[in-house]
Image (cartoon, rainbow, N blue to C red):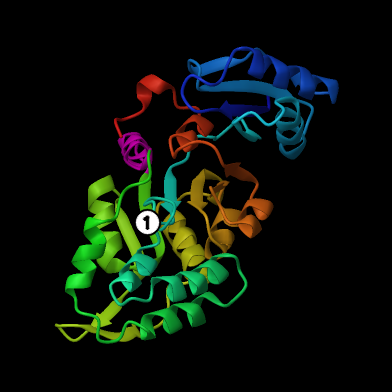
C-alpha cells in the first residue's frame, strides 16, 4: 500500500468500529484500503490504502467519524519514521507561553498575552511583537525567571516523543521564539539534542528590556530545520516539525511531516497534518511506532 492513514484517540476511546468506519469511507471514494493495524489497543490504528490522496483520505475519515475525538494523519507509507525532529516550545512542548507568564511578575500578563495572541495568529509581525513585549519588562528582576520556570510544565507526551525518537537515532531540536534561558532547561528535561531560541538580555540583576539581535523568528526556525537536515545529510522528507503558532508555519510547511499541534486557526488551516485531541505521543503513532516502543513520559 502506498499510503497510510493513522487514527489516534485518547486512551480507550478508539473503538474497533471507528477504523472500520473510516475504511468504508475512503473505499467509497475509490481507495483500495487494507486491514487496520493496531499500534495501541483502543488508542491508535494504521489504515493502509492506495488510490486516494492524503487530504481526501483525512477529510473522508473525519467526516465518517462524526465528530469523535480522533486525530487523523495520512501520508506516504515509505519513510514515515523521521530522523530529525524540530519542535516549538511554548504551547507545544510546554503547556504555557513563558513570556506571558514572565510578564505576570511585572503585572503585565494580560497586555503581553494579547500581543502574543495576535502574533501567534499571524496578525502582527513576530519580531516587532517580541521586541515590544520584552521592552515592557525592562527592570524586572532576574528572580522572575526562576519563578516562571517553577510554574512551567511539560506538555503530556513531550518526554515520550523526544526520548523515543532519540532512542531510535533521531536528532531532536527545540526551536523557539522564546528564550534560551528556558529552552536550555526544557531541552535538558526532555532530552533534546540541541536548542535554538532568542537571547534575553540582562545587566546581572534585572532585564534590560532588550533581546539580542537578530530575532529568532519564523525564518530562523526554517533555516534551523534546513541547516540541521543538511548537517545530518538528510532530505527534508526525513524531518518532522511541530508547532502551534504562525511563526512555526514555514518549518511545518517544509518538513516531511509538518504537524499543527493544538494550533491557532491560521496554522491549523494551513498545515497538512494536525493534532487537536491527543497529546504529543500522537506524533509517534503517526510515524508507526507501537505502544511497546514508546518511552515513558
Q: Is residue 140 magenta?
A: no
Q: Indicate the position of residue 225 as horizontal and vertical percent values.
A: 47, 59
Up-down relation of residue 24 to residue 72 (above or below):
above
Q: Image height check: is 33 above or below 263?
A: above
- Residue 134 vs residue 3: left or right? left
Residue in front for this viewpoint, 98 or 113: 113
Q: Main secondary structure of the magenta part?
A: helix
Visible residue check, residue 136: yes
Dividing the picture into quarters, in which one does residue 297 lie?
Answer: top left
Query: Does 165 lie within the magenta span?
Result: yes
Q: Residue at x 32, y 86 (%)?
A: 209
Q: How many marks?
A: 1
Q: Position of residue 257 (x, y in %)?
A: 56, 44
Image quarter hosting the N terminus: top right
Q: Is residue 191 visible?
A: no
Read off the residue under disc 1. 174
Q: Which residue: 50% across, 22% down?
A: 43
Q: Residues within 10 Å of mark 1 (few under 14, many from 20)?
A: many
In the image, is 203 to the left or to the right of 221? left
Task: Give the residue furthest to the left.
Answer: 204
The part of the chain drawn in magenta is: 157-170
Q: Secondary structure at mark 1?
A: strand
Hey, which quadrant is residue 164 in on the image?
A: top left
Q: Is residue 63 left or right of residue 117?
A: right
Residue drawn where x is 50% and y is 33% of the image: 287
**Percent position of residue 4, x then y:** 63, 27
Q: Position of residue 166 (x, y in %)?
A: 32, 40
Amino acid at each position: 500500500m502506498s499510503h497510510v492513514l493513522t487514527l489516534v484517540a485518547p486512551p480507550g476511546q478508539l473503538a474497533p468500529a471507528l477504523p472500520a468506519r473510516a475504511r468504508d469511507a475512503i473505499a467509497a471514494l475509490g481507495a483500495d484500503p487494507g486491514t487496520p493495524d493496531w499500534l495501541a489497543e483502543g488508542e491508535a490504528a494504521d489504515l493502509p490504502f492506495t488510490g486516494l490522496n492524503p487530504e481526501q483520505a483525512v477529510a473522508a475519515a473525519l467526516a465518517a467519524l462524526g465528530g469523535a475525538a480522533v486525530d487523523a494523519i495520512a501520508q506516504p507509507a515509505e519513510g514515515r519514521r523521521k530522523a530529525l525532529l524540530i519542535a516549538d516550545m511554548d504551547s507545544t512542548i510546554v503547556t504555557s507561553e513563558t513570556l506571558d507568564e514572565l510578564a505576570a511578575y511585572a503585572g503585565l500578563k494580560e497586555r503581553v498575552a494579547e500581543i502574543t495572541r495576535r502574533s501567534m495568529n499571524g496578525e502582527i509581525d513576530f519580531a516587532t511583537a517580541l521586541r515590544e513585549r520584552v521592552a515592557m519588562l525592562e527592570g524586572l528582576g532576574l528572580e522572575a525567571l526562576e519563578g516562571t520556570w517553577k510554574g512551567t510544565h511539560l506538555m503530556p507526551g513531550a518526554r515520550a516523543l523526544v526520548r523515543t525518537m532519540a532512542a531510535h537515532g533521531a536528532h531532536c531540536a527545540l526551536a523557539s521564539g522564546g528564550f534560551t534561558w528556558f529552552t536550555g532547561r526544557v531541552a535538558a528535561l526532555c532530552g533534546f539534542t540541541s536548542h535554538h531560541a532568542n537571547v534575553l538580555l540582562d545587566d546581572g540583576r534585572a532585564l534590560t528590556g532588550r533581546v539580542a539581535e537578530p530575532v529568532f523568528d519564523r525564518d530562523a526556525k526554517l533555516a534551523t530545520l534546513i541547516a540541521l537536515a543538511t548537517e545530518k545529510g538528510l532530505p527534508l522528507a526525513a524531518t518532522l516539525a511541530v508547532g502551534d503558532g504562525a511563526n512555526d508555519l514555514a518549518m511545518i510547511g517544509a518538513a516531511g511531516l509538518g504537524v499543527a499541534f493544538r494550533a491557532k486557526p491560521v496554522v491549523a488551516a494551513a498545515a497538512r497534518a494536525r493534532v487537536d485531541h491527543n497529546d504529543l505521543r500522537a506524533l509517534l503513532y503517526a510515524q508507526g511506532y507501537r505502544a511497546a516502543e514508546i518511552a515513558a513520559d
